[in-house]
Image: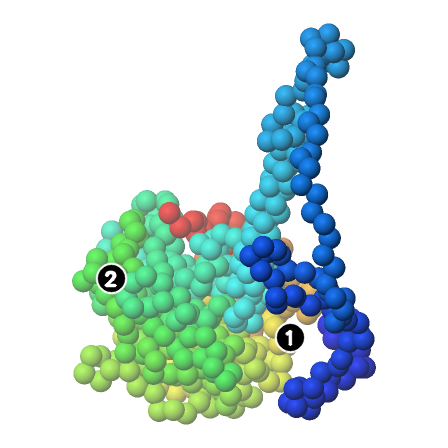
Amino acid sequence: MTSSMDRYEYSTLEVDTEAQARNQYAETTSQLPEVNQSATEHLNYPEVVAGSGTAYKPDIDRTLPEAVHVTETTEGEKAALGPTENRICGMKRKVFWGVLIGAIILIIAIVVGVTAGVVTTRRAVSASDSDSSGNNGSAGSTNNETALFANTNIATANFTDQYGNENYLVAYQLNNKAIYLSAWNSSNKNWVVSAVVDGNTNNLGLDSVRKGTALALDVFAYDNTSRDIHVYWQLPDSGGLSTIKALTYTNDKGITTTAEMPAANWIDSEAANSYISTAGSALISYGKQCDLCNQYTYLYWQTANGIREASYQNASLGWNSDGSTIQVDLSGPSANSSLAQAHAAAATVDGHRSMNIFYRSTAGGLSQIVNGDGRYVGHYLGRDVGPDANIAAFSTGYNETSANWPEPLGFQVLTADPAADDGVQLTYYEGGAWTKAGDEVASLSDCKARATMIANRARRVYCLVGNGTNTEIVEYEWRGDPDDTSTYSNYNRIGTVDTTVR
């Protein structure tokens, strides 16, 4: 494409700037008329002379002009000429109205064109904003800023209250980067939507949330009647790293799953701004669930060197992390591996409890890290998965592998690998050994396309289904029997999690 300079041609004539300085200019070859400076009051007009010759003085004719008589038009002549046409603004009426209508049409066309241009520009900007941060594509583009972000990650937790009601929590992100929480109480049987980070409270703007952030959620149970809720997410990327943010909803603020919880009641956690993950790292967390469960709060994330852990014991000791990564006799996690957490309670006060982290190793193996009795042990589950495989897991039974124990330890580990295109696969732990199920979990087939799943201790699985503005979080319940491996792939679709902001 040529530049704007290429569309013009310039003369090769030059201006003699030195002549201007010397006050020398080109001379003309013709003689211009001169003004006669000797004009008098008797002949008060300047005379035009040709060069320097004698001025020409014509005689003045003082005869008055002859009057001409004009006859008036008679009525008959007027009738013969026809009626006189009325005019508007000096124009014939037909011409005037034609010009006016044309002008109105032109103005309407201009207004419509400008309006269409503004709307198109706003839509383009909105689509650009939806895709400008994080590692997510256009699937999340929509004009509804408070709709579910189509590429959101999901976090979940659960607890049983003092009335025996089951409570399920699901955290997710909206198009405008806000973080919300939907809660279900089995006595209420409705999802209640509450803001965690809405951009207007707690001095947290939406610029404090990474688009497509990892999410972690846990409930810390002090006893059967009081508990805290913890939410973790990431700040926008900076040099390939993301600072971890955290909020806590404390028991004294009135935790409820039957009514909206005000965003202003969330308070800063000491874990906030204390730890840094890789930009695409997953986050998982755990809070004390029972007296025979792990007793502290834990947070796990990935760095360039492996998986790190931070823990909170009490207010006097606060959060603690030694800065090192977890070391086991397996290779570490692959870059931005999916992470899943499942805990198992001790069977007796003399028994052992454990937290279990599942991930994809750099060698591609589906792997487990067991955090039990203050030590880490690694296990390979016998299945290889791709680098983008999603992992969800929950436990069954107690942390007891004795053959005589009525509720022995069991795990259900679900994986969805987009590269393999083999649906949702099950790897389970039963009878002291890991086994790969032969067929895909057909009842979770709707989850394979998006490959975004999460599970909680209540054996509920949540996954993304659909695309774009049709994306939903769908809930499934496991209907299997821990003692019957033939039922391990049985899931029942419960319904859709309500994420509508009201």
**Residue at figure coordinates x 57%, y 47% from the top left:** 115
Whether residue 341 is situated above or below residue 479 in the rendered picture: below
The location of residue 123, given as percent across then percent down, is: 56, 55
* Quadrant of the rendered image containing residue 423: bottom right
**Which residue bears the numbered disc 1?**
386
Horizontal arrangement in the rendering, residue 14 relative to residue 275 (left or right) = right
Horizontal arrangement in the rendering, residue 125 relative to residue 9 (left or right) = left
**Residue at figure coordinates x 54%, y 78% from the top left:** 336
Whether residue 181 is situated above or below residue 419 in the rendered picture: above
Instruction: Determine whether label 1 and label 2 are within 8 Å by CB.
Output: no
Total marks shown come to 2
**Which residue bears the numbered disc 2?**
265
Q: Is mark 1 on a helix, strand or loop?
A: loop
Comparing 197 with 440, the one in front is: 197
Report whether residue 275 is seen.
yes
**Residue at figure coordinates x 67%, y 41% from the top left:** 62
Q: How crowded is mark 2: few (under 14 residues within 10 Å), some or many (20 or more)?
A: some
Whether residue 270 is situated above or below residue 137 in the rendered picture: below
The location of residue 330, given as percent across then percent down, is: 54, 88
Horizontal arrangement in the rendering, residue 81 relative to residue 452 (left or right) = right
Q: Is mark 2 on a helix, strand or loop?
A: helix
Q: Which amino acid does label 1 sit on?
A: Gly
The location of residue 462, given as percent across then percent down, is: 49, 58
**Residue at figure coordinates x 31%, y 57% from the top left:** 160
Q: Which amino acid does label 2 sit on?
A: Asn
Comparing 56 with 245, the one in front is: 56
Whether residue 189 is situated above or below residue 78 in the rendered picture: below
